[in-house]
């Protein structure tokens, strides 16, 4: 417990942020070493600013002790970066969280065929049905469904996984003790009972808009790939896809009507190289040979309230017609040890070097403009940040040569073509 409070102290240092906390822990070896470091040692760390050094030198453990008390009352476990069951997948992303607050049972992520399913909060019936059918079939086949418990696509994915009798993981943009949105309270409780609710934010943290873009890096970091089911052009789900590409994860997308605004984001992802998905087999065949101990070689029949075909009606352009060619489990058609099918990766710049030494606002804005130019109003909507903070972040990015201004108050990643 003594060491644990220093990890909680480190992760609660507001001026450091996730990237700064991780870098400081690496430099000093442990959060406890950082806590007791003298001013001279802190000044020898060039990555620490003067305000950050001052925050560290206050050596205030009271907030950490209050957080640990709240965790005890709420039944939350604190997982730190040094713990043996901290996922290696997550350790290897940019700015991994130093601490995670958990409710439920933590899967062994590094052994799981985990897939993150995301999409619009204002999903259409098509998007909800696609999320439910795909998530149900994938969970029944043995994949672990990860999502963000938001209304719309996220909630549909979680519900379908639970109906399949499988655990599911919800990554929150608020404290792990706070069911959000309120309408998903029963779903939150079911996930905590059968799977895991987790957050990098301590208990009691409200669902502030700025938390969700940061949360998305954890969604993609825990998984082998990200499936975007339905996303308009200004969807935060597209930020998760950018994170996935930067982290070397697979990106899948469900196609939609070319005239439907709700499908513009998914169709664009497919155009840029994401793998088109019209049935669970399109995903399962990627992982069956790699995870034979997880993905089962048979297809279970769907429950009565989900139609028999696990394909999405209308995805090929003909309403009510389902091509069942891909509904068989891929392990029956792909021999063990089969190399994964080559496909072009989404054409997104490696953002790792560009994200270095940026604060959370600037990182969120940079991720928002990666892949396609965006108007300032779009950046505000996608990031959830106030307009003044977006404009300040854009100024920083311009000065550092990482974002280019375009006519009409639009911005793009430096060097990317329209």
Image (cartoon, helix red, strand yellow):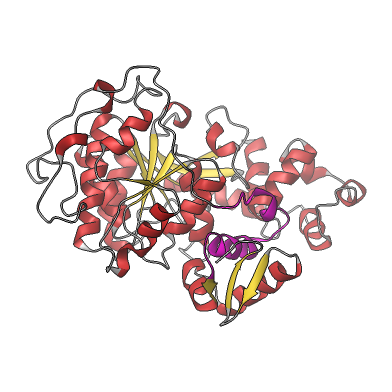
Image quarter of residue 285: top left
Residue under the image location 44 percent in, 50 percent down: 176
Instruction: Name the residue: 58% across, 63% down.
Output: 417
Task: Return the residue found at the far left.
Answer: 304
The image quadrant where one finds the C terminus is bottom right
Q: Quadrant of residue 319?
A: bottom left
In this picture, residue 292 sits left or right of residue 89? left
Q: Is residue 395 above or below residue 144?
A: below
Residue depicted at x 25% and y 62%: 257
Residue 203 visible at all = no
Residue 42 is situated, as x and y percent measured from the top left of the image, at 86, 49
Q: Nearer the viewer, residue 295 or 110?
A: 295
Q: Which residues are magenta?
A: 348-373
| Label total for image | 0
- Image position of 93 with respect to 374: above or below: above
Closer to the camera, 205 or 335?
Answer: 335
Residue 301 position by quadrant: top left
Query: What residue is rendered at 40% in x and 67% in y?
Result: 233
Residue 255 drawn in magenta: no
């Amino acid at each position: 417990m003594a060491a644990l409070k220093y990890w909680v102290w480190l992760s609660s240092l507001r001026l450091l942020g996730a990237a700064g906390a991780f870098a400081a822990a690496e430099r000093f070896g442990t959060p406890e070493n950082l806590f007791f470091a003298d001013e001279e040692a802190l000044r020898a760390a060039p990555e620490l600013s003067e305000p950050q050094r001052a925050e560290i030198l206050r050596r205030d453990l009271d907030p950490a002790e209050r957080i640990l008390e709240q965790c005890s009352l709420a039944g939350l476990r604190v997982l730190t970066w040094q713990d043996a069951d901290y996922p290696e997948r997550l350790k290897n992303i940019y700015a991994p969280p130093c601490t995670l607050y958990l409710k439920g049972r933590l899967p062994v992520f590094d052994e799981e065929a985990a897939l993150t399913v995301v999409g619009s909060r204002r999903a259409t019936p098509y998007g909800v049905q696609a999320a439910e059918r795909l998530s149900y079939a994938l969970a029944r086949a043995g994949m672990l469904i990860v999502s963000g418990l938001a209304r719309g696509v996220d909630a549909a994915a979680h519900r379908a996984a639970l109906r399949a009798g499988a655990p599911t993981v919800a990554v929150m943009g608020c404290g792990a003790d706070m069911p959000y949105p309120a309408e998903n309270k029963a779903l939150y409780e079911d996930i905590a009972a059968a799977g895991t609710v987790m957050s990098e934010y301590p208990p009691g943290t409200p669902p502030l808009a700025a938390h969700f873009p940061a949360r998305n890096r954890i969604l993609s970091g825990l998984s082998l790939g990200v499936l975007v089911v339905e996303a308009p052009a200004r969807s935060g789900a597209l930020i998760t896809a950018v994170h996935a590409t930067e982290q070397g994860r697979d990106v899948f997308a469900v196609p939609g009507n070319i005239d439907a605004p709700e499908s513009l984001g998914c169709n664009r992802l497919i155009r840029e190289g994401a793998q088109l998905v019209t049935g669970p087999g399109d995903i399962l065949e990627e992982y069956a040979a790699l995870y034979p101990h997880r993905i089962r070689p048979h297809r279970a029949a769907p429950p009565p309230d989900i139609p028999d075909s696990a394909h999405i009606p209308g995805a090929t352009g003909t309403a009510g017609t389902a091509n069942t060619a891909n509904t068989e489990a891929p392990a029956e058609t792909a021999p063990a040890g089969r190399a994964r099918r080559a496909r072009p990766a989404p054409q997104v710049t490696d953002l790792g070097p560009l994200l270095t030494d940026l604060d959370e606002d600037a990182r969120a804005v940079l991720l928002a403009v990666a892949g396609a130019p965006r108007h300032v109003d779009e950046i505000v909507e996608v990031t959830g940040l106030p307009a003044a903070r977006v404009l300040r972040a854009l100024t920083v990015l311009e000065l550092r040569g990482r974002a280019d201004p375009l006519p009409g108050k639009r911005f793009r990643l430096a060097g990317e073509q329209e």
